[in-house]
Amino acid sequence: MSHAKAISNFSMLTNRPYTVALIVPTGIGAAMGGFAGDALPIAKAVAASCDRLIVHPNVMNGAQLYWNIPNALYVEGYALDKFAAGSWGLQPMRRNRIGIVFDRSISDDLRVRHLQAADAARATLGLEITDYVVTDTPLDVELRTASSGASWGTIGQPDSLLRAVDKLINVAGAEAIAVIARFPDDLGGTILHDYRHGTGVDPLAGAEAVISHLIVRTFKIPCAHAPALAPLPIDPEISPRSAAEELGYTFLPCVLVGLSRAPQFVERGGGVGGTGEIWNNQVDAVIVPESACGGSGLISFARSAHTKIITVAENQTWMLVPPKTLGIKSIAVRSYLEAIGVITVDRAGMSLDSFYPQIDRLKEISS
């Protein structure tokens, strides 16, 4: 290798932004990040410790509470899986034109509440939002719970949803999609009670993921969902982790803020493409709950020799899939505070071994 080429390669490596993906899977009862935007403090702290942070809506969405993190990329879960696999790249955006889909089954009063929230986002935050579309039939969302306790759901009329999105893209010029679907008010049993009191699984999260996955897979466009629900009775014992969802009539504001600068998706053969595009081989570290390593995105990231997988033990979930079960090599830490320490050391180009009291002596490699 020539001296000039060596200098060029060194410059490229040292100047490349340090990139972290923060993953807290949806609907699996994560102790931190399984409620109403309660992983947002973690995201803010991690973002301060890296150059670029890749997150998904479950981490950032806190109903009417949100936080603009300038170096964070808001990537829907299906798109994050495609990115991790190297099929899609991310193109950062200064601004997206957001289109809103309303479920036909939402009452007029509840729709007005959501439209007022969207208008407030335009007037107060300067977001660009198109005229909206109402689906031609009710979406008929149903909620389900798996034997593991994880939440999921179904859409009775997916074609109606896709027709509405198609109109927003081709008629209104939407570049990102916010969906507001009517969700059942009666969830049955103690599911909602447990969630509101900080001990259960988010009963809506799994169905929300189904909705956004369908749109992103079909149109390759950023999307996030805000459920429409009747106001719940006041309960003075609500957990602080789920309290954000008690603040008003709509969960829409955080979705609009996230989508306003969500990256667009780029299809290429893999590797670094055009100027500013981000690809999976540029991710330096992934932080994930220790028991939630079964997702396809995490498995894809784990195949890279360059990307460090950092698993956090104290963020317990109902998934119960540790890295060892899948043969994934990881750096095990107890807390997110320790995970931030790991990426800080790695970003500085130092060995983690230097930060332990005992360092093993070097050994000769036998023939």
Image (cartoon, rainbow, N blue to C red):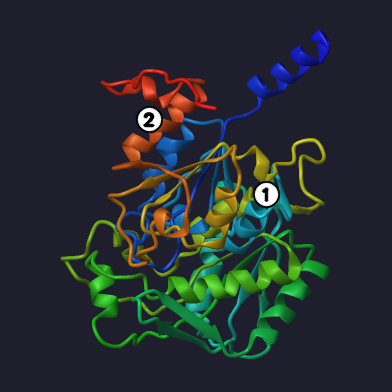
Residue behind mark 2: 341
Q: Quadrant of the C terminus?
A: top right
Q: Nearer the viewer, mark 1 or mark 2?
A: 2
Q: How many marks?
A: 2
Is residue 83 placed above or below 286 in the rendered structure?
below
Residue 60 is situated, as x and y percent measured from the top left of the image, at 47, 52
- Is residue 257 or residue 297 the one in the foreground? 297
Would you say residue 9 is visible in this rendering?
yes
| Type of amino acid at the residue the image marks with label 2 | Gly
- Outermost residue toward the front? 367
Disc 2: CA contacts within 10 A as few (<14), some (14-19) or many (>=20)? some
Disc 1: CA contacts within 10 A as few (<14), some (14-19) or many (>=20)? many
Q: Is residue 220 left or right of residue 194?
A: right
- Tell me the tag on residue 292: none
Residue 109 is situated, as x and y percent measured from the top left of the image, at 48, 80
Residue behind mark 1: 263
